[in-house]
Image: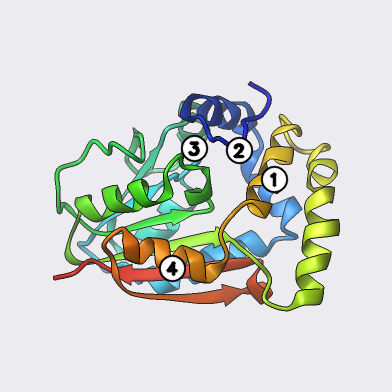
Amino acid sequence: MSRAGLDKNPREVAEMFDGVAKGYDLTNSVMTLGFDRRWREWTRKVLDAKAGEKILDLAAGTAVSTVEFGSAGAWCVAADFSLGMLRSGARRPVPKIAADALHLPFASGVFDAATVSFGLRNFQGTVDALREMARVVRPGGRLVICELSKPSWKPLRQLYNNVALRALPVIARPVASNSDAYSYLAESIRDWHDQRTLAELIAEAGWEDVAWMNLTGGMAALHRATKPA
């Protein structure tokens, strides 16, 4: 599978990510000019994982973020439905599990927080995935989503959509193991919700106190919420 379609068939998406697992982290840094590291740092700060907490990092890929979330002593598990991505992160010392975001293999209320970095838009059923995350998080627990989004300033939004996203497959070609998959990436970003709409979907899924913060002019955004106590 060279790339998935916007219907986001789970098997196709998993196969596509298996195909880009080699060199995935380097490709992301090249494509974002290093901003991905800054966005992950903001995610870590907003998540604010404490020692002894249990954190679910969903769509964790190679577990780069999972390791960072656990730096303060939290117990963090990396979950992803791409075995290729998990294998690529095998050297990272965190527990890893293959998991379907819509049918998580965890008991209800076992995590203090759930987080997804740049993976929510790949799920087939955004609200269903958000509800499933709410199921496995304890009452009063937290949700933090970091996702590519819509620049808030119109000139930047036009430049982003008409130049940067069109250039993604070309930029990825020298370093990506499957540059065709980055055509899907660009299309999935264009097709994704804006910040307010995603906040409404999070609330629809049963979370409360939903808020968001733009990163880098809205090219990415952080959404946070709380499970009702």
Q: From the viewer's perspective, is residue 206 above or below residue 9?
A: below
According to the picture, the residue beneath numbered tag 1 turns out to be: 187
Ranked by sequence position, the earlier of labels 1 and 2 is: 2
Residue 163 figure quarter: bottom right
Amino acid at circle 3 = Gly
According to the picture, the residue beneath numbered tag 4 turns out to be: 199
Label drawn at residue 89: 3
Disc 3 versus disc 2: nearer the observer: 2
Between the residue at mark 4 and the residue at mark 2, the CA separation in whole angstroms equals 21 Å
Q: Are marks 1 and 2 in contact (CB under 8 Å)?
A: yes
Amino acid at circle 1 = Glu
Badge 3 marks a residue whose secondary structure is loop
Q: Residue at x 54, y 69 (%)?
A: 195
Nearer-the-camera pick, 147 or 71: 147
Amino acid at circle 4 = Ala
Q: What's the coloring here?
A: rainbow
According to the picture, the residue beneath numbered tag 2 turns out to be: 6
Which quadrant holds the N terminus? top right
Between the residue at mark 4 and the residue at mark 3, the CA separation in whole angstroms equals 31 Å
Amino acid at circle 2 = Leu
Ranked by sequence position, the earlier of labels 3 and 2 is: 2
Dot 4 crowding, Cα within 10 Å, few <14, some 14–19, many 20+: many
Q: Residue at x 29, y 62 (%)?
A: 73
Between the residue at mark 3 and the residue at mark 2, the CA separation in whole angstroms equals 26 Å
Is any atom of residue 131 visible in this view?
Answer: yes
